[in-house]
Amino acid sequence: MQVTENSFKGKTVVLTAGPTYEAIDPVRFIGNHSTGKMGYALAECFAAHGANVYVVSGPVNLQARHQSIHITHITSADEMYAAVKQLAPEADIIVYAAAVADYKPKVVADKKIKKTGDDLTIELVKNVDIAAALGKEKKEGQFSVGFALETHNESANAREKLQKKNLDMIVLNSLNDPGAGFKHDTNKITIIEKDATTAFELKQKTEVAQDIVNLIWERLNG
Ligand code: CTP
């Protein structure tokens, strides 16, 4: 069977996308180069196949086109977690495509930090792992997908994350593949599941989104 425009009709998809920004003071933050393109491409693809899609999005320069996509804009990992936690109980499918900052400043200065000494140390504390935390509360029949960007031991690391975060699928992009990952319109992925590994060619992110959506559909209907 082929995925059609109604394949995900009646399904609710919750998706995280983009980076998170962790405030240092009122004018500075710790962030990363995620553009959100992969997450937004997935949202469009699910919506084009009939799903109702809720995107919890970090700061990006993108807009959703499909009317079945509802966006909640957040800035930090804590805000992303709070928004996803509220939406998660209704989700049939959750996709964690955001590049969440792993650490945040322990203290956020309430005034701009002035240039006084030659050194400046900012103490960081771990952020909540959104996928892992919600993986512990995953309800029966819910299907969850994570992303992993690895530079070494790719497959083994991805498998560990699959288990640790209680995911059904991990979309692995390797930084060793030219054209894959941040700042590119293309991506080369391998999808890792408990008992399967599926490798794809380098493609446009819109086509990569279709490959991911097709495989999720197969797993839900196979
Ligand atoms: N993730 C998340 N919350 C975090 C960190 C990651 O939800 N605080 C999700 C990402 O959206 C992605 C998956 O977990 O789907 C893997 O993220 P990654 O950063 O590769 O994994 P980490 O567990 O942070 O491991 P490390 O950075 O040490 O490789």
Image (cartoon, rainbow, N blue to C red):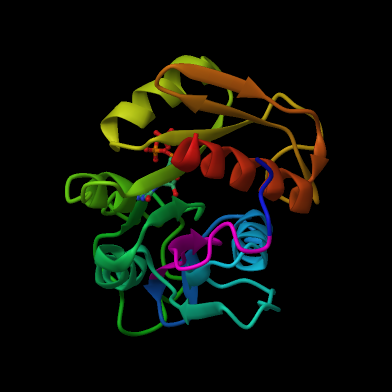
Q: Is residue 152 visible in this depiction of the protein?
A: yes
For residue 179: magenta?
Answer: no
Against 202, residue 95 (above or below) is: below
Q: Magenta segment range?
A: 5-23
Image x and y of residue 80, in percent = 36, 68
Name the residue nearer the viewer: 33 or 132.
Answer: 132
Image x and y of residue 75, in percent = 44, 74
Image x and y of residue 134, in percent = 24, 52
Rendered-image quarter of ligand 1: top left
Residue drawn at x 60%, y 47% is: 213
| In the displayed structure image, the side of residue 194 where residue 172 appears, left or right | right
| In the displayed structure image, the side of residue 177 where residue 97 appears, left or right | left
Residue drawn at x 75%, y 26% is: 177
Name the residue nearer the viewer: 102 or 110.
Answer: 102
For residue 7: magenta?
Answer: yes
Placement of the N terminus among the 4 image quadrants: top right
Please identify the residue farthest to the front as the structure is shown: 1
Against 198, residue 65 (above or below) is: below
Q: Quadrant of residue 127?
A: bottom left
Count of numbered marks: 0
Residue drawn at x 68%, y 56% is: 4
Image x and y of residue 95, in percent = 46, 52
Against 74, residue 209 (above or below) is: above
Name the residue nearer the viewer: 97 or 29.
Answer: 97
Against 169, residue 98 (above or below) is: below
Q: Is residue 184 visible in this depiction of the protein?
A: no
Residue drawn at x 46%, y 57% is: 118
